[in-house]
Image (cartoon, helix red, strand yellow):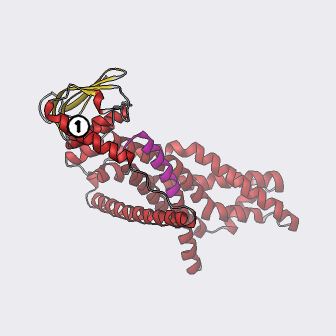
Amino acid sequence: MTETSASSSGERPLAWFDLEDENRLRVGGVWRLAQVGLLSRRLERAGLSGRAVHEIDASALTALDSAGAQLLIRAVPSPDAITGVDKRYRGLLRRVADAETAATDQPRPRRPGGAGAQLALIGWRTVGAGIRMWELVGFFGLCIVAIAGVIVRPWTLDGRATFHHLQAAGLNALPIIGLLAFLIGVVVAFMGALQLQKFSAGIYTVDMVGIAMLRELGVLFAAIMVAGRSGSAFTAQIGTMSLNEEVDAMRAIGLDPVAVLATPRIVALVIALPLLTVYADLVGLAGGAVVSLALLDIGIPLFLERLSSAVDTTAFLIGMAKAPFFAAAIAIIGCFEGFKVTGSAASVGRRTTTSVVEAIFAVILIDAAFAMALSWLNI
């Protein structure tokens, strides 16, 4: 198995390593600070970091500094296991090994316990949340600039990518959103019918189902499903590209990753979620109609007649007005967490989970803001 770093010139790698057998690693080239980050990631992917081999043959090294020496020392149980090293680097390896040993022997600082530890933890998490919020606001600004550029120059939008994400986030989500909306309509109608029947007011079940689905539940549950499907997918896709250094390659050739990767996803989701909301509203009303027919003997013509008289278009428009805000929040958070992926594949999983939680929190926060604003406007 051979792993190499990118070479700056010609076909010969600048820095490389070769696992000759399970316990012997051969390294060569220039192991300096500029190559250490890439080499460290590739050693980790190959399972060779952290005292993973018994011996390293360093006879092919052409240059070494303290960062490269530290990487080599951390791959073997003892500095004596590094053989064949040029005499120019023996002193450096010894000094770095001594420093590593001294750092390991240092007693770890005791962690504060009790109430002090909890206060410190709360403080650190508060600071971390503030930093994340600041970074998210900065990314939101970058997205606004990118979308403004698309509005001014529509031909710069990648139409093929936008349609691809529109299909993935919209068309492919129809079965699960339809099933969920139907069940929500059934549950709302069932609960309303059980209570209203006691007062001989079963017909008002239609009012409750109509207002709840069109104004709140249709768009809310469609957004939550989209956050779970599409928001997490955005994070995983962009995060994988970050790990494969494709995002860095875009920057190197002068492309803006936010414009190329985030903008088509945001545009696609802003188009898809309102359409999914209409679909969820219709399917949810169908679920309510089925329960009304089964429990209250309210036929479909009577259900539609009561629905048209009890629910005006304002409820529907309020639900539709929320959809673009929900979609933008889900897409921006999903892309933001994708760009934050670093290190290993485990980071993709952590960021994906974080993006779903944050997106659902943002959806509920926006919904609460709408509720307060509409209450203040007496709508």
Q: Quadrant of the C terminus?
A: bottom right
**Can residue 306 be seen in this snapshot?**
no
Q: Give the crowd class for mark 1: few <14, some 14-19, many >=20 residues within 10 Å.
A: many
| Three-letter amino acid code of the residue under disc 1 | Leu
Residue at left offset 32%, top offset 34%: 42
The image shows residue 114, relative to residue 89, as above or below, that is below
**Residue 297 horizontal side relative to residue 272, left or right:** right
The image shows residue 376, relative to residue 222, as above or below, that is below
The image shows residue 128, relative to residue 348, as above or below, that is below
Q: Name the spot of residue 329 as percent of width and height, x first.
A: 45, 60
Identify the residue at the far top of this view: 21
Q: Along the line of sight, which residue is nearer the eye, 290 or 56?
A: 56
Q: Which residues are magenta?
A: 342-359
The image shows residue 279, relative to residue 214, as above or below, that is above
| Labels in figure, total | 1
**Can residue 176 be seen in this snapshot?**
yes
**Residue 253 horizontal side relative to residue 70, left or right:** left
From the image, give the main secondary structure of the stretch colored magenta: helix
Q: Name the spot of residue 168 as percent of width and height, x first.
A: 46, 43
- Residue tagged 1: 93
Q: Name the spot of residue 91 as percent of width and height, x first.
A: 18, 37
Residue at left offset 33%, top offset 48%: 261
Residue at left offset 50%, top offset 49%: 353
Q: Quadrant of the N terminus?
A: top left
